[in-house]
Image (cartoon, rainbow, N blue to C red):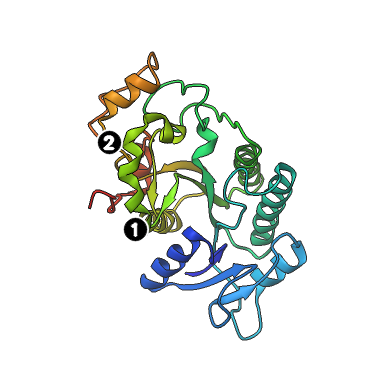
Amino acid sequence: MRIAVTGGSGKLGRTVVRELRAQGYEVTSLDATGERGAGFVQVDLRDYGQTVDAILGVDDRHTGFDAIVHLAAIPAPGIVSDIQTFHNNMIVTFNVFQAAQRAGIMNIVYASSETVLGLPFDVPPPYIPVDEEYPARPESVYSLTKHLEEQLAIELVRWNPQLKIIALRFSNVMNPEDYAAFPSFDADAARRKWNLWGYIDGRDGAQAVLKALELDVTGFDRFIIAAADTVMTRPNAELVAEVFPGVPLTRELGVHDTLLSIDKARRVLGYDPQHSWRD
């Protein structure tokens, strides 16, 4: 496949670009900033004309794509104003989805977010571990955009039965250099309760992207993508009893098993996280 990665210069994007290239794919990063040269096209994805033009082809860079990995976004709440977050993320996602279809690209994988599960869980989750089965519970403008992007994808694949859009609800992306801070989380269980003590190693995030790209399906689906464990050395039973007493448990939690269920991603995508901060 010839693959475009929007936001290829971002924290997760850099790893995704590297890992897809290592698998032998021809990858071009589409982003507002990045290292100039082969494999990078500078484009303002808020501008639909630039977006569709860059996806269709750019002299001396590429002649089109077979698949799109859409990661470009303001990546979290509170970085910029709420209205800027909404306008940027919604417009950019619509532009990319629409331009991809105009270019005949039917394979789209994109970054949704764990935040649609109800983060920061000031209202406790309906049960633990959380999964994809309960309705979205956006609690911030950023999360609202991620929920609306999923709704957009649902309608687009209804209109076009040949289209595949897979939403990956990534947990908090970490690189190996980030792991030095993890032992400090144990002192206060509430410090990382906002996402049930979850995270995702960027390399495993890239694995999930690859599995989703290679999945031979049509339509829309969504998957939680997290590491297999939590950020804590304290056991899950202790953490949940302290921070979320009374929340129903749907199964035995395991001592350090992720509380962001990746069962569906394992079953459908073949996702198998390989990296842990404990290593």
125 vs 105: above or below? above
- Residue 87 — which label? none
User: Which residue, given by chain and number where applicable, does mark 2 sit on?
Assistant: 257
* Left or right of 144 in this view: 48: right
User: Looking at the picture, which amino acid does disc 1 mark?
Assistant: Pro
Image depth: mark 2 or mark 1 in front: 1
Mark 2 Cα shell of 10 Å, populated few (<14), some (14-19), many (≥20): some
Residue at image point 47% right, 66% down? 14
Using the numbered discs, state the Cα–Cα distance from disc 2 to disc 1 in whole angstroms: 19 Å
Q: Are marks 2 and 1 in contact (CB under 8 Å)?
A: no
Earlier-in-chain disc, 2 versus 1: 1
Using the rendered image of the protein, determine whether residue 219 is visible from the camera's viewpoint.
no
| Residue of label 1 | 176
Residue 195 screen position, x and y as percent: 44, 35
Quick one: SS at disc 2? loop
Q: Amino acid at mark 2?
A: Asp
Question: In this view of the protein, can residue 75 be seen by the observer?
Answer: yes
Judged from the image, the secondary structure of the residue bearing numbered disc 1 is helix
Q: Nearer the viewer, residue 205 or 237?
A: 237
In the displayed structure, would residue 15 be above or below residue 83?
below
Q: Residue 238: percent from the left, percent from the top?
A: 28, 24
Q: Residues within 10 Å of mark 1 (few under 14, many from 20)?
A: few
Q: Residue at x 25, y 30 (%)?
A: 235
78 to 124, vertically: above or below? below
Residue 70 on image: x %, y %: 57, 57
